[in-house]
Image: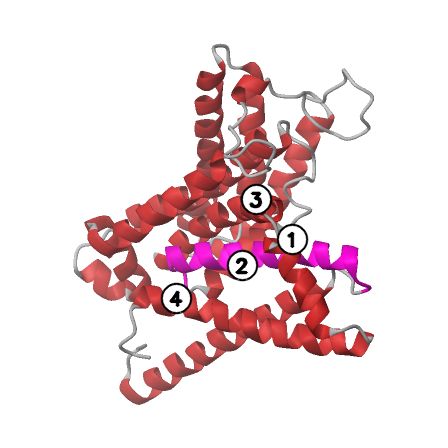
């Protein structure tokens, strides 16, 4: 295992975790009296059974991949960004308002909206960096708590100043974005849109960046050994700002592509109810923050969620089975981090070092 390519190893870990989760799911299904094989067949059909279901899985995976890449970016630099949900919500809100109010042709509004989403998510993450530097507020705590402020603020904006009052909808939402500013669909009649191509392109870009660029090397070194990295000339503050802006910007982009590619307006709660950000967090942790592994794990978790919905339609097993499997994945992550923590603690005790 030590000589395995890191990319292959990062992909094997989430696959193994999901296999453990499926085993737990099989045990749960056996208690319901349903056929385990039939349930798993329906799970597969719901996720990959036809091109329509596959496109639904790809569409659901898009915001998870983008947010997961952002969370993984911060993890790689040694920082915990728990605020992806708030950054995603503000990114989606900024993208919707920009597409609605910026003048010009549709493609100009589209590009401006995506940039606004990235900027909103990145700027919100900088606020956590400022509190860390100015008041020594731990990033993990500040980013987590900023989620609540962002979500409540977005709810106020779309239920007050920018609420759509033209129709009879009772939901707090903005007006519909013009069709010329929508992200194009990859296939006619399917839900998957150009945001999926953006997510895959960014995954490849980050793999190459971490493998071949100086910035990628500095980010990795800062995450692996901060003291060594700073001794070698890496500016920790600059790298913290850079990694958190990139992390928040990607989460904001996730919100933007979801609004411009799926909902075509900002709807209060539509980005938080599916739990995209927390699924992305799980994907990044399972893949040990490797970009390719994070994308693969995000796709598999999205397939699990869409497949569970299909299984519920055709069997008596509820969709909550996917929650059971995800709970097992969380246990897997906890065991992995607990084992790593114990190894570091033992090494520090024996050798005086953290590795």
Identify whether 340 is placed above or below 289.
below
Q: Closer to the camera: disc 2 or disc 3? A: 3
Identify whether 256 is placed above or below 104.
below
According to the image, label 4 marks what residue?
10
The answer to whether residue 49 is visible is yes
Proximity of marks 2 and 3: CB atoms separated by less than 8 Å: no
Calculate the distance from the C-alpha at mark 4 to the C-alpha at mark 1: 23 Å
Q: Which mark is residue 306?
A: 1
Q: Which of the two discs, 2 and 4, labels the residue nearer the N terminus?
A: 4
Identify whether 225 is placed above or below 275.
below
According to the image, label 2 marks what residue?
300
* Foreground of the two, 296 or 291: 296
Q: Closer to the camera: disc 1 or disc 3? A: 3
Q: Position of residue 216 (x, y in %)?
A: 26, 52
Q: Is residue 134 left or right of residue 313?
A: left
Pick out the residue farthest to the left.
232
Q: Which residues are magenta?
A: 288-316
Disc 2 secondary structure class: helix
Q: Which of the two discs, 2 and 1, labels the residue nearer the N terminus?
A: 2
Quadrant position of the C terminus in the picture: bottom left
Q: Position of residue 245 (x, y in %)?
A: 40, 42
Q: Is residue 43 left or right of residue 135?
A: right
According to the image, label 3 marks what residue?
55
Q: Is residue 290 magenta?
A: yes
Calculate the distance from the C-alpha at mark 3 to the C-alpha at mark 4: 25 Å
Disc 4 secondary structure class: helix
Q: How many residues crowd mark 2 within 10 Å: few (<14), some (14–19), many (20+)?
A: many
Q: Position of residue 328 (x, y in %)?
A: 62, 72
């Amino acid at each position: 295992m030590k000589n395995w390519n890191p990319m292959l190893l990062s992909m094997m870990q989430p696959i193994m975790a999901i296999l453990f989760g499926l085993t737990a799911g099989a045990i749960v299904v056996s208690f319901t009296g349903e056929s385990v094989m039939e349930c798993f067949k329906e799970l597969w059909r719901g996720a990959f059974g036809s091109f329509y279901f596959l496109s639904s899985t790809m569409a659901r995976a898009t915001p998870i991949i983008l947010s997961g890449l952002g969370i993984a970016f911060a993890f790689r630099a040694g920082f915990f960004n728990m605020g992806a949900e708030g950054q995603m919500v503000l990114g989606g809100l900024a993208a919707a308002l920009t597409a609605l109010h910026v003048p010009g042709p549709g493609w100009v509004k589209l590009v401006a909206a995506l940039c606004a989403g990235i900027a909103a998510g990145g700027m919100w993450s900088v606020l956590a960096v400022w509190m860390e530097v100015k008041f020594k507020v731990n990033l993990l705590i500040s980013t987590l708590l900023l989620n609540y402020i962002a979500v409540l603020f977005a709810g106020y904006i779309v239920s007050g100043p920018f609420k759509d009052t033209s129709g009879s909808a009772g939901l707090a939402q903005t007006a519909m974005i013009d069709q010329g500013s929508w992200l194009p669909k990859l296939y006619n009649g399917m839900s998957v849109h150009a945001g999926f191509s953006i997510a895959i392109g960014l995954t490849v870009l980050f793999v190459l960046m971490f493998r071949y660029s100086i910035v990628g090397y500095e980010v990795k070194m800062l995450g692996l050994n901060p003291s060594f990295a700073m001794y070698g000339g890496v500016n920790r503050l600059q790298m913290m700002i850079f990694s958190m802006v990139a992390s928040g910007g990607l989460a904001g982009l996730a919100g933007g592509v979801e609004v411009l590619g799926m909902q075509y307006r900002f709807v209060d709660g539509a980005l938080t109810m599916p739990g995209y950000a927390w699924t992305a967090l799980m994907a990044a942790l399972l893949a040990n923050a490797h970009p390719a592994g994070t994308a693969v794990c995000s796709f598999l978790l999205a397939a699990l969620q869409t497949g569970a919905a299909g299984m519920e339609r055709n069997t008596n097993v509820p969709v909550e089975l996917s929650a059971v499997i995800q709970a097992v994945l969380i246990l897997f992550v906890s065991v992995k981090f607990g084992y790593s923590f114990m190894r570091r603690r033992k090494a520090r005790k024996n050798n005086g070092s953290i590795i």
